[in-house]
Amino acid sequence: MKLTEVIRIAWEAILKNKVRSFLTTLGIIIGVAAVIIMVAISAGTEATISEQITSLGSNLLFVQSSFSRAGPPGMGRSSGGLVYDDAAAIQEGVSGVKAVIVEQQATATIKAGSVTLENITVLGSTTEFPSVRDMDVAQGRYFNETENERKQKVAVLGSTLATELFGDANPIGQVITAETTKLTVIGVMAEKGTVGDVDYDSRLYVPIQVVFQKFTPSMFARIMGDSVRLLYVEMEDDANLEEVTTQIELLLAKRHDVSLDSLDFSVTSQQDIISTQESTTAAFRSLLAWVAGVSLIVGGIGIMNIMLVSVTERTREIGIRQAIGATPDDIRMQFLAEALLLSIVGGLIGMGAGMGGAILYGFLSDMRTVIVPGSILLAFGSAAIVGAFFGFYPANKAAQLDPIEALRYE
Amino acid sequence: MNDKTIIETIDLTKVYGMGDASVAALDGVSIEVKAGEFLAIMGPSGSGKSTLMHILGCLSRPTSGQYILDGQDISNLSKKELALIRNQKLGFIFQAYNLLPRTTALRNVMMPLLYDHNHHISDEVGEQKALNMLELVGLADRTHHQPQELSGGQQQRVAIARALINDPVLIIADEPTGNLDSHSGHEILDLLRSLHQKGVTIVMVTHDPITAEYTQRVIHLADGKVDSIKHNGHKL
């Protein structure tokens, strides 16, 4: 029997029961669409997160204090973790480093005129901060090296903070109070948004020396230098990641007087963070795809069910075809083709619905969706396999009917 | 008329059930049908005529004995091989016409060509052949009608056209007039007779003596055995 004939007969059989065929394929349609949409949403989330991480700046290394050793930070000569001067040492002593910025955070209540805001993050940094972290100053300017060294009481506002404190008025030149320290506003940052759980627009940016002096004073600072949590190292574009990492580790281990086996800090690259993030979302994504895949299997069972009904309904037709010479293989092929065609048509509709749904979802919600071509192939392929698998049993049942019994069937 | 033997059965038996509960539907039937013959098989219900027809029509296999169709022993063929024999050598006419519903007369007639595994017949050739067959049975103007738009007599003519399209060596007709009024019934029997005159071999199962009158020879079955063979006398 020619393949075109097989397909034609199967297609006619499907069209004879349009509503039933549609309802049968609905399971497949939903399954395929669900796989595509789920994967699109998780891929969109992943892309957003990666972009946000990259938007923090490029070619970054994060050097973090790790307080793995006994005792609070600052107790004893060698257990203090990172100090402010480490930044300058890395800048000087490691090749391939473009800039090093230091951050020191504190929380403060801020007042400007009649407005009081509590729990505002005060971020102390050095002058390279905007360029390394890929942030722009929208109005006024960032503080300079002299202002930092001289601990001048100046501040740059995050965009949201500026609006909350001053509304539409120009904040430049205004004086705000953070805890007890009066700060003169010299600039406003451009909008940056939220990355992870950090809202870059609601922070107050001040020279790090001011933070050390006014917000996080330490009695050990005079002996050991000011302890800091995090250093951002921006590498030259052509710098080798491993080489720079090793150099930093050697240098800081020597400065902190610790062995390489028991470092009191860790060096992480931006790529490490992205990979960690990706492996997390990849696991989440495959979980979603599996859940959606289950609905494909349910759809397949629906096809099997309706094919069994169809075989019973068309027993007499099967008998007629057998009488005029259809072999068991011919009959099996006919019903298998019908099941396959149902699932393939369902798969195609599901593909359209899935892509449309993913685009619509991205359009209507804040979440971004990215249609992954692999997910379309996977979903469609599974639909076809499901059709063949669940179509086989009914088709086999049809092929094994006895022609005499089948012809007698009313 | 040539002397070629189309059907030869030797001591056919068909037993249903096992052990004590077994029933012999056929109990040693030996018959012979020559090419070009028009033969009737008669008998009361339970006489084994349906069972014999199913075996002659390659729809089931005998329990023992031999069935030689057109020179080929087909007693022990597989389901698939029997299907191919039905397709190549046999044409069926049923009491209930057994056309595919919601399918045009033309498509119904062409259907056996779909399952012709030996020759690949193009759609155009097949369609022309089907049109010729429908013309032969007098339905040239009904080719695109579906069964539910045709009268019983017309449906049976479509079935006859379908039975003829593969140039079978044998037509098996199972109560072909059973569902028809007597006028249409006689028309169908006249058609069968005219096919017989063109040399087609026909075996017809019937319980109606008037219908059997149309044939040359009547085999009566009783209790699974050949009871009598009667020649109708008219040489056609």
Image (cartoon, rainbow, N blue to C red):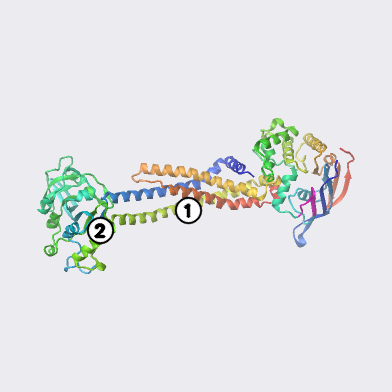
Q: Give left or right: position of A104 versus B73.
A: left
Q: Which residue is mark 2?
A: A244
Q: Identify which amino acid the numbered label 2 is placed on.
A: Val
**Residue B218, relative to residue B63: is it above or below?**
above
Residue A23 image offset from top left, x and y in percent? 52, 44
Rendered image quadrant of residue B122: top right
**Residue A262, relative to residue B28: is it above or below?**
below
Is residue B99 or residue B185 the one in the foreground?
Answer: B99
Whether residue B172 appears in this view of the structure is no
Q: Residues within 10 Å of mark 1 (few under 14, many from 20)?
A: few
**Circles 1 and 2 on the same subunit:** yes
| Helix, strand or loop for disc 1 | helix
Residue A34 image offset from top left, x and y in percent? 44, 48
Is residue A189 or residue A361 the one in the foreground?
Answer: A189
Q: Which residue is mark 1?
A: A294
Q: Residues within 10 Å of mark 2 (few under 14, many from 20)?
A: many
Magenta stretch, main secondary structure class: strand
Which residues make up the magenta segment?
B66-75
Q: Give left or right: position of A37 versus A154.
A: right
Residue at 60% across, 47% down: A335
- Alpha carbon separation for disc pair 1 and 2: 48 Å
Is residue A253 or residue A66 the one in the foreground?
Answer: A253
- Magenta span has A31? no
Pointer 2 indicates a residue of which chain? A
Which mark is first along the chain, 2 or 1? 2
Q: Tell me the quarter of the image containing the N terminus of chain B.
A: top right
Label ID, residue A51: none
Q: Identify which amino acid the numbered label 1 is placed on.
A: Val
Residue A294 image offset from top left, x and y in percent? 47, 53
Whether residue A134 appears in this view of the structure is yes
Residue A242 image offset from top left, x and y in percent? 28, 59
Rendered image quadrant of residue B186: top right
